[in-house]
């Protein structure tokens, strides 16, 4: 079978693709450019999901002066030296929303691969800034996410399936993999999560296979499926031991010098399956998805060659695109669509090459798409045909086939076609140019410095007394400035053996009782059927787990003040909230036994007098 749709060169016409077997170093520490492209797309999608499906619900509560951490309190009591955050420039919700929208725009440009290096940097910087604004809502997934974007700044994420590929005038058909210090660092970063977590899990609970029992008893996290699994005790020991040893062995296997490609595919499948299972049994938020995406750069070339063969067919291989040779805007559009639709070997030619094609283009005032049978398509029908041949986006062709969408697309297309000169000037910022993809020596040096620093930071986390001799705390400022600081202590040295739920008992000015936490008139002290479902978002779950810890008790005052303000805003029809008390219903887990919950009062707050009494 002829295969044509995924590899190839991005020139205007189809070119032959030079291939050579990668050397040992490239095979182990290099990354296929197509894997980087897929990685780039999922990074951008995750940024959009994090911002607009999760964080935006808590924008006022977590990032403004109205919320749980006003800027004045943060700067006075909680900010760490070297943290940088442009989100601190205003405490207004509209400004924070504007920054969210800017970050979303950068994420879209990252997905499309437009000026990829610039928008990778901006995405990383805006994420760093957001994370520094309120560290109380962060979890391990945020740290890994931030690090993946950091190393991506040194890599050519836009080399394939991107706008940058379409506008790049310098093509090296032999450049199929990137081997650099940064490529090795990105791969190592993913493995650091597992290796250092494994080292920190140095406890009998893990080695004896009892950790899953404790993990599934953490009510903050457990899902209905997790509760069901907890009732299958014969599965818990093998699941614990399997997880414990796989976290060590799996990341080691991806660096073996023999059978590297097939072994990597097996490891990737098993790692993604493990994280999928974690996410179904425990509410761990973004961590499961970021972890799965972190394994995409390990995808070897044989995966893409297999996909190329499976996705190739006569319909896709026979597709041809013709544009108005005098219209620079038309050429850019066709090349961009070809790259983004993963049709890299589809010929894009000026219509003047064939008299009959040129005649059709002038009569229809439209680009011309010719399928493998020689049938010609115009306007929206041409776009539908190209979409139908895309190995990834073909479902959109069925949407476009709906008459209302077809008519709208035709209307839009004719408006553009009749004003090509204006659109050519409007798209002048998309220029054909030679885009550098291979790193310079300075980039290798900078990446190497950061890699050594990150390795040292991780080693120090396993034995501070020993490793601090080699990496003293005085060096911490460098890591905090660039936010490459990391600590992989998930369920280490063992899962929590105490957890619980919150009861916030309030009294209104008219003397009535009110449950602030559940937003009900009646205060209930009974354990909810599913504690994890009580948290509106994963960010609130992390925040509430943090304020229970004694080291974060200083935040309880500002959480109390926020509850007073928010109750007045949410319930103007009720009497004002006068006082409330926050109870943590602590429930300890012992060997195959759950102890009776104990109510622990952690904060008492009086809204009217702005006076607090600590218990």
Image (cartoon, rainbow, N blue to C red):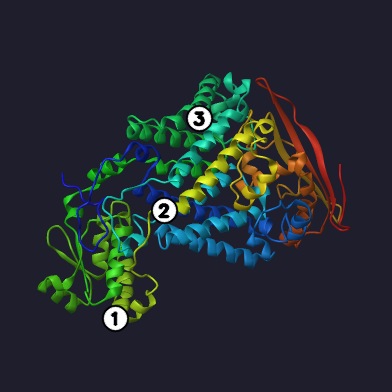
Q: Residues under labels 3 and 2: Cα distance?
A: 32 Å
Quarter that holds the N terminus:
top left
Q: Is residue 608 above or below residue 308?
A: below
Which picture quadrant has residue 573? bottom right
Mark 3 burial class by Cα count in 10 Å: few <14, some 14-19, many 20+:
many
Could you say which quadrant of the image residue 372 lies in?
Answer: bottom left
Q: Residue at x 31, y 42 (%)?
A: 301
Dot 1 falls on a residue whose secondary structure is loop
Q: Which residue is mark 3?
A: 247
Describe the element under mark 3 as helix, strand or loop: helix
Mark pair 3, 1: CA separation: 59 Å
Left or right: 144 as drawn, with respect to 330: right
* Residue placed most toward the observer, 82 or 612: 82
Residue 405: % across, % down: 33, 66
Q: Is residue 532 visible?
A: yes
- The CA span between labels 2 and 1 is 43 Å
| The quarter of the displayed image where residue 416 is located | bottom left
Identify the residue under disc 1: 418
Using the rendered image of the protein, determine whether residue 524 is visible from the camera's viewpoint: no
Sequence-earlier tag: 2 or 1: 1
Eyeballing the image, is 469 above or below 157?
A: above
Residue sitting nearer the eye, 427 or 253: 253
- How many residues crowd mark 2 within 10 Å: few (<14), some (14–19), many (20+)? some
Confirm or deny contact between disc 3 and disc 2 (CB under 8 A).
no
Please provide percent x and percent y for residue 85: 64, 59
Which residue occupies 74% across, 44% down? 547
Instruction: Describe residue 509's horizontal placement relative to residue 83 as left or right.
Output: right
Residue at the left extreme, as displayed: 355
- In the shown orientation, is residue 100 left or right of residue 527? left
Which residue does the numbered mark 2 point to in the structure image? 439
């Amino acid at each position: 079978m002829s295969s044509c749709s995924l590899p190839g060169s991005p020139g205007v016409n189809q070119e032959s693709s030079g291939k050579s077997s990668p050397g040992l170093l490239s095979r182990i520490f290099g990354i296929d450019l197509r894997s980087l492209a897929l990685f780039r797309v999922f990074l951008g999608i995750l940024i959009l999901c994090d911002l607009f499906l999760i964080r935006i619900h808590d924008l006022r509560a977590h990032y403004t002066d109205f919320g749980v951490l006003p800027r004045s309190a943060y700067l006075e009591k909680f900010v760490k030296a070297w943290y940088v955050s442009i989100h601190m420039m205003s405490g207004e919700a509209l400004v924070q929303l504007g920054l969210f929208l800017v970050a979303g725009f950068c994420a879209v440009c990252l997905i499309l691969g437009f000026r990829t290096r610039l928008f990778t940097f901006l995405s990383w910087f805006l994420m760093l800034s957001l994370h520094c604004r309120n560290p109380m809502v962060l979890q391990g997934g945020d740290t890994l996410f931030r690090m993946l974007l950091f190393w991506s700044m040194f890599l050519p994420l836009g080399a394939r399936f991107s706008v940058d590929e379409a506008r790049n005038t310098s093509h090296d058909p032999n450049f199929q993999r990137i081997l650099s210090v940064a490529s090795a660092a990105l791969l190592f970063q993913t493995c650091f999560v597992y290796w250092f977590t494994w080292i920190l899990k140095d406890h009998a609970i893990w080695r004896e296979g009892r950790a899953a029992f404790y993990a599934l008893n953490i009510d903050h996290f457990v899902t209905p499926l997790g509760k069901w699994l907890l009732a299958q005790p014969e599965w818990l020991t093998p699941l614990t031991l399997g997880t414990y040893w796989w976290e060590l062995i799996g990341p080691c296997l991806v660096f073996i010098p023999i059978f590297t490609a097939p072994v990597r595919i097996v490891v990737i499948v098993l790692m993604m399956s493990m994280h999928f299972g974690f996410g179904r049994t425990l509410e761990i938020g973004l961590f499961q998805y970021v972890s799965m995406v972190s394994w995409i750069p390990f995808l070897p070339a044989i995966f893409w060659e297999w996909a190329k063969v499976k996705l190739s067919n006569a319909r896709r291989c026979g597709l041809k695109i013709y544009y108005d040779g005098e219209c620079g805007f038309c050429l850019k559009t066709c090349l961009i669509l070809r790259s983004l639709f993963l049709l890299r070997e589809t010929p894009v030619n000026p219509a003047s090459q064939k008299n009959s094609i040129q005649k059709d283009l002038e009569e229809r005032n439209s680009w011309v798409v010719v399928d493998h049978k020689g049938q010609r398509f115009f306007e929206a029908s041409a776009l539908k045909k190209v979409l139908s041949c895309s190995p990834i986006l073909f479902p959109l062709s069925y949407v476009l086939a709906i008459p209302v969408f077809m008519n709208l697309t035709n209307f839009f297309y004719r408006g553009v076609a009749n004003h090509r000169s204006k659109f050519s000037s409007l798209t002048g910022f998309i220029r054909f140019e030679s885009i550098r993809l291979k790193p310079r020596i300075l980039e290798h040096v900078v990446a190497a410095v950061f890699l050594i620093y990150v390795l040292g930071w991780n080693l120090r986390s396993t034995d501070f007394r020993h490793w601090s001799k080699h990496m003293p705390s005085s060096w911490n400022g460098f890591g905090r400035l660039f936010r490459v600081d990391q600590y992989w202590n998930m369920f280490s040295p063992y899962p929590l053996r105490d957890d619980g739920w919150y009861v916030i008992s309030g009294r209104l000015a008219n003397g009535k009782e009110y449950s602030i936490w559940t937003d009900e008139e009646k205060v209930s002290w009974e354990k909810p059927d599913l504690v994890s479902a009580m948290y509106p978002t994963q960010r609130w779950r992390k925040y509430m787990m943090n304020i229970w810890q004694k080291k974060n008790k200083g935040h309880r005052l500002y959480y109390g003040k926020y509850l007073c303000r928010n109750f007045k805003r949410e319930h103007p029809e009720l009497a004002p909230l006068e006082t409330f008390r926050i109870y943590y219903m602590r429930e300890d887990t012992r060997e195959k036994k759950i102890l009776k919950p104990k109510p622990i009062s952690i904060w008492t707050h009086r809204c009217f007098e702005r006076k607090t009494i600590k218990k």
